[in-house]
Image (spheres, rainbow, N blue to C red):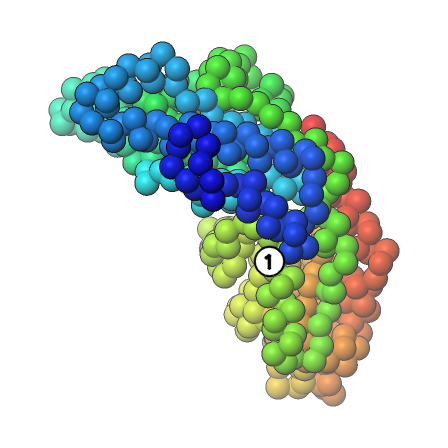
């Protein structure tokens, strides 16, 4: 804790980062430290704005005048996958002392904005509101709820979003909203090759007028570096395996918030109990004790790059349906080149002990694939695909 430029004392992101370095959680990275310094400067500016607004009625008036002249500029941080952007965003969001702050997935935020726009248009049609243009009132509503707005993994792929972004964010910035975003691409590469991209270009100009752009050009993919040293098949099932699975999940998700999701398959919804970014975690029963089929498993494999499965039991003649589903599941994950982390009651070649039916023969292939998916060659190939995907995004 220390005081800078007459501000109230507060813990800094730099202090928290240094603590992680000293405890061995992370290694010090010059590129990350530059972002840390920028985020701390931004927190100082936000604190100054808040204090000016609260000092007095007259001070609030003068503060508003100053803001119109020099609004707080946000920050847009771009860099490759696994460079620590999410970790730094987590630190910023936890520590920024703004009551009205929001961290959202960009797609969720835009879905909210579209819903509000539609509701305003309906209200205008019914004569309940007077403004024809829905953008200004929607921006006021959003700004009233949160004037510090954080997007992790900012990207634009939807043409409906692209068409309104410039006007919506111009209105949000006019309301004093401060935007902090991380992305895999620089602003000029957003919506690259998108339909009618020329109509999107004004948003890039609006964004660059209201944020400072900072590249996180670390040469190290910390997420892949950590993942390459993780165990992927834990047996037997005991408290130690559960603890290690939890530790692996924290590393795999790299600081992202864990939420429940759904994967939609032909109008049906398959529950995903824990998801964060491109990783998902299931219990064996979630995937194999429910009436799911190959189409469901293919949809899951297509959505997530890393799958964790807890508590795979030894299967016998009394669990033939579960065994059939597990066979289909592993086939889907294998064909998609998915990274699989499992806690199981026995080694792969001892998971099926049934004596009737065709499952014993079919499970031999599954055991072989599970063994291959633990190999260094498989995991190296997975890491190479992630690196190639990140390079292609640039």
Residue labelled with disc 1 = 250
The image quadrant where one finds the C terminus is: top right
Above or below, 263 relative to 2: below
Q: Which of 210 and 68 is in front in this view?
A: 68
Residue at left offset 36%, top offset 12%: 69
Residue located farthest toward the left when viewing the structure as drawn = 127
Above or below, 380 relative to 137: below
Q: Residues within 10 Å of mark 1 (few under 14, many from 20)?
A: some
Point out residue 295 in the picture as x, y percentages from the top left corner. Answer: 60, 56
Residue located farthest toward the right when viewing the structure as drawn = 377
Residue at left offset 44%, top offset 28%: 5
Point out residue 70 in the picture as x, y percentages from the top left corner. Answer: 39, 15
Residue at left offset 53%, top offset 41%: 13
Point out residue 326 in the picture as x, y percentages from the top left corner. Answer: 66, 69
Point out residue 209 in the picture as x, y percentages from the top left corner. Answer: 48, 15
Tell me where residue 85 sits by quadrant.
top right
| Mark 1, secondary structure of its residue | helix
Q: Nearer the viewer, residue 69 or 85?
A: 69
Is residue 30 something that shows in the picture?
Answer: yes
Residue at left offset 63%, top offset 80%: 238
């Amino acid at each position: 804790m220390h005081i800078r430029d007459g501000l109230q004392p507060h813990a800094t992101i730099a202090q928290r980062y240094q603590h992680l370095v000293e405890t061995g959680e992370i290694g010090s990275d010059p590129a990350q430290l530059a972002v840390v310094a920028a985020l701390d400067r931004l927190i100082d500016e936000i604190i100054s704005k808040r204090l000016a607004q609260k000092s007095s009625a007259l001070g609030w008036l003068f503060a508003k005048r100053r803001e119109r002249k020099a609004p707080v500029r946000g920050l847009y941080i771009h860099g490759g996958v696994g460079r620590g952007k999410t970790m730094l965003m987590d630190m910023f969001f936890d520590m920024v002392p703004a009551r009205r702050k929001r961290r959202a997935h960009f797609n969720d935020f835009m879905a909210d904005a579209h819903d509000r726009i539609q509701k305003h248009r309906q209200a205008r049609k019914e004569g309940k509101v007077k403004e024809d243009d829905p953008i200004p009132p929607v921006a006021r509503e959003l700004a009233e709820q949160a004037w510090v707005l954080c997007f992790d993994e900012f990207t634009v792929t939807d043409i409906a979003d692209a068409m309104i972004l410039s006007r919506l964010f111009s209105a949000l910035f006019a309301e004093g909203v401060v935007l902090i975003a991380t992305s895999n691409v620089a602003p000029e590469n957003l919506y690259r090759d998108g339909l009618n991209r020329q109509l999107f270009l004004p948003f890039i100009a609006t964004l660059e007028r209201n944020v400072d752009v900072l590249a996180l050009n670390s040469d190290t993919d910390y997420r892949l570096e950590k993942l390459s040293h993780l165990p992927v098949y834990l047996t037997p099932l005991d408290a130690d395996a559960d603890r290690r699975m939890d530790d692996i999940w924290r590393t795999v998700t790299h600081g992202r918030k864990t939420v429940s999701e759904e994967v939609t398959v032909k109008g049906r919804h398959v529950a995903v109990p824990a998801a964060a970014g491109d990783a998902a975690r299931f219990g064996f029963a979630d995937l194999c004790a429910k009436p799911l089929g190959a189409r469901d498993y293919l949809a899951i494999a297509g959505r997530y790059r890393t799958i964790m499965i807890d508590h795979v039991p030894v299967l016998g003649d009394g669990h033939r349906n579960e065994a059939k589903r597990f066979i289909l599941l592993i086939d889907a994950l294998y064909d998609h080149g998915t990274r699989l982390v499992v806690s199981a009651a026995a080694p792969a070649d001892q998971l099926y002990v049934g004596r009737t039916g065709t499952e014993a023969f079919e499970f031999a292939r599954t055991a072989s694939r599970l063994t291959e998916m633990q190999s260094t060659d498989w995991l190296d190939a997975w890491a190479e695909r992630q690196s190639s995907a990140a390079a292609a995004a640039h």
